[in-house]
């Protein structure tokens, strides 16, 4: 994942004016990576949606058991 981040953010956007600029772009990329990026192997949903579904299913299984 670090390699992907460096390729998509750090190297693509060029020289940085400050550490704050790098931090801001990092936060935006992580938000996209977790909340907007659709993944084919998990049914074209975001990682956040997959995690929410996983824990909802776990809660259902706990109630059944």
Image (cartoon, rainbow, N blue to C red):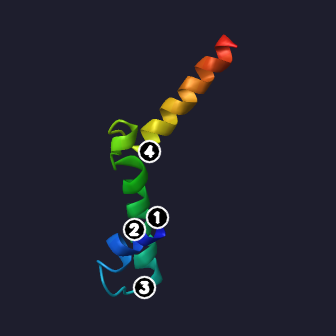
Q: Earlier in the sequence, mark 1 or mark 4?
A: 1
Q: What SS does tag 1 mark?
A: loop
Q: Earlier in the sequence, mark 4 or mark 2?
A: 2
**Disc assigned to residue 1:** 1
Tell me the distance, in whole angstroms, between the alpha carbons under discs 4 and 2. 16 Å
The 10 Å Cα crowd at callout 3, few under 14, some 14 to 19, many 20 or more, is few
Q: For the point 35% across and 74% down, which residue is it?
A: 7
Vertical arrangement, residue 29 with respect to residue 10, above or below: above
Q: For the point 47% across and 82% down, which residue is it?
A: 19
Counting from the top left corner in percent of width and height, residue 52 is at 50, 34
Q: Would you name the residue on which mark 2 appears?
A: 4
Counting the numbered discs, the total is 4
Q: For the point 42% across and 85% down, which residue is it?
A: 18
Q: Would you name the residue on which mark 4 appears?
A: 47
C-beta proximity under 8 Å, tags 1 and 2:
yes
C-beta proximity under 8 Å, tags 1 and 3:
no
**Outermost residue to the top:** 64
Mark 3 or mark 4, whichever is nearer to me? 4
Instruction: Please say whether residue 52 is visible from this viewpoint.
Output: yes
């Amino acid at each position: 994942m670090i390699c992907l981040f460096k390729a998509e953010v750090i190297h693509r956007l060029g020289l940085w004016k400050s550490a704050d600029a790098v931090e801001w772009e990092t936060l935006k990329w992580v938000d996209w990576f977790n909340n907007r990026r659709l993944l084919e192997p998990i049914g074209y949903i975001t990682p956040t949606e997959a995690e929410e579904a996983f824990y909802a299913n776990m809660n259902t299984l706990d109630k059944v058991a």
